Structure formats: C-alpha cells, structure tokens
Image (tube, rainbow, N blue to C red):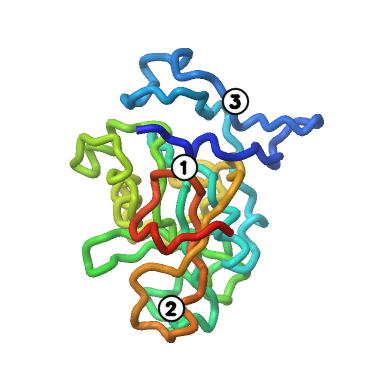
Amino acid sequence: MPLPALLTGSDPQPSGSSSDGRPRSLRTIRRSRVSPLNRPRMRPPPYPIPVLTGPTLVPAEFFLVDALDLAPRLLGKFLRRDDVVLQITEVEAYRPNDSACHGRFGVTARTAPVFGPGGHAYVYLCYGLHTMLNVVADREGVGAAVLIRSCAPVMGLETIQKRRRQSTDKPVLLAGPGKVGQALGISTEWSNHPLYTPGGLEILEGPNPESILVGSRVGIGYASPEHVNAPWRFAIAGCPWVSSPRNTLRPA
C-alpha cells in the first residue's frame, strides 16, 4: 500500500536546520537505497520516502498555542518510541469550553494531564480498552489537547504488526486512535510525559502537507450541536492512512 502521507508536503525549516534553511532531520532517498536491515517489509512505493537521519525534536514552544492551531500543524510530524516511527496523518482538536473535551469535567485524577503544559502527553482509556494518545495544547491550566486519530508507518513495521496482532501493511493497521496507541505500545502511565525531550515517546519534525482535509469530529454525539458540527478534524489530503468516516472530510 503506497504511503502518500510521507511525501505529500514540503519540508519545513525545523529548529535544527542549517543556516541555508535545509533541514537536517530528514533526507529523501529511494527505498532501494535503504539497508535491508532497516527497511520495513512493505511494498515499495513508486516514489521517494523520507528517512530519519539525526531527527530533530519539535521544541516545547511549538505546542503553546490553541488546540485548533496546533492540530493541523501536527500533520506530517513523526511520533517515535523505541524502534517504531509513525507519521501523523489525522488529528482532532479539543478546546476549552468544548462540550466534547475531557476538560469540561474540570481537573480530576483522570483529566489532570490535559490541564498540564503544552507538549505533554495525555493518554486515556476509551471504553476501558483503547489507549488514546493526545498532545496537550496551549499553556498550563487551559485544558486543551489534540487527539492523534491516525498515522502511517515509517519504521518498525514488524513491531507495529506484533503489537497490533495483525500482519497487514494496509491502512487498517493504523487508521484509528486506539490502533495508534496500541502500535506505540503505550499505556495511561505515559500521561504527563514531555514529547519534546529525548527518550521515551517523542514528536519529531516532519514535512508539511501540501493540502489538508477538514471535517467534524468522530464519536461525539453527546456534545452540543455547535461542537458536534465544528470542523475540528484534520487529515492529510490524498492519504489512505485516515480513519472512517472519510466522506465527511472536505478540502480546507
């Protein structure tokens, strides 16, 4: 299955870029040049894919913005834990005074991490089964986050498949927030973890998508009509690694 999410964008100038603007975090090569020891077992796409070489962590200040601004900016970034690297392809924003946001309950033992400083992880269990990874947004005390809904595999496919208990390399492997959490092998103990520091779970610089789709968020029928219909879901256009429903997404 092709991975257009890995290519449908232009490289940003990350904090670790050189003086002439060329990012040091990524270089584009063809799959045939990748060492067989590091190559994921996927059908080779008919185009180059980015390979991480000395990747740059996204700085803490990147996350200190409104969740609605942070969400689309996370598209194309990379999540890394151990030998697994995923590219973020779909997200949802959850804001203060949002009737679909966990912050509406105030600070509790479960929701306290979402009121932490931007750039930390907020991980919770959905229906007691699915581990959902969120990136806390904005300043400490605001109570906002971005849910990582879908990703594309970049490295560590065998580990992903083992954790997911599936041998497929198709989008069903990572199209859905619970699948992302399972592929990363995380639990609620990762809440409050800073995603901008080396080690553990990290967010790395990645290419900006050329175009983005927007739509209403999924599974929030309990919220008020204005929030149910708010176009706060974002995905990389032309990317198959996006969860259902796809027919509610439109060009931004």
Front residue of this view, candidates 86 and 107:
86
- Kind of residue at badge 3: Arg
From this view, report whether residue 18 is shown above or below residue 62: above
- Kind of residue at badge 2: Val
From this view, report whether residue 158 is shown above or below residue 216: above
* N-term-proximal mark, 3 vs 1: 3
**Image marks 3 and 2: residues in contact by CB distance under 8 Å:** no
Element on which disc 3 rests: strand
Name the mark on residue 87.
Answer: 1
From this view, report whether residue 247 is shown above or below residue 105: above
Q: CA distance from mark 2 to mark 1?
A: 27 Å
Marks 2 and 1: which is nearer the front?
Answer: 2
Q: Quadrant of residue 101?
A: bottom left
Name the mark on residue 27.
Answer: 3
Residue 156: x and y, percent? 35, 32
Residue 155: x and y, percent? 40, 31
Horizontal side of residue 129 vs 65, given as left or right: left
Q: Crowding near pointer 3: few (<14 within 10 Å), some, many (20+)? A: some
Pointer 2 residue: 228
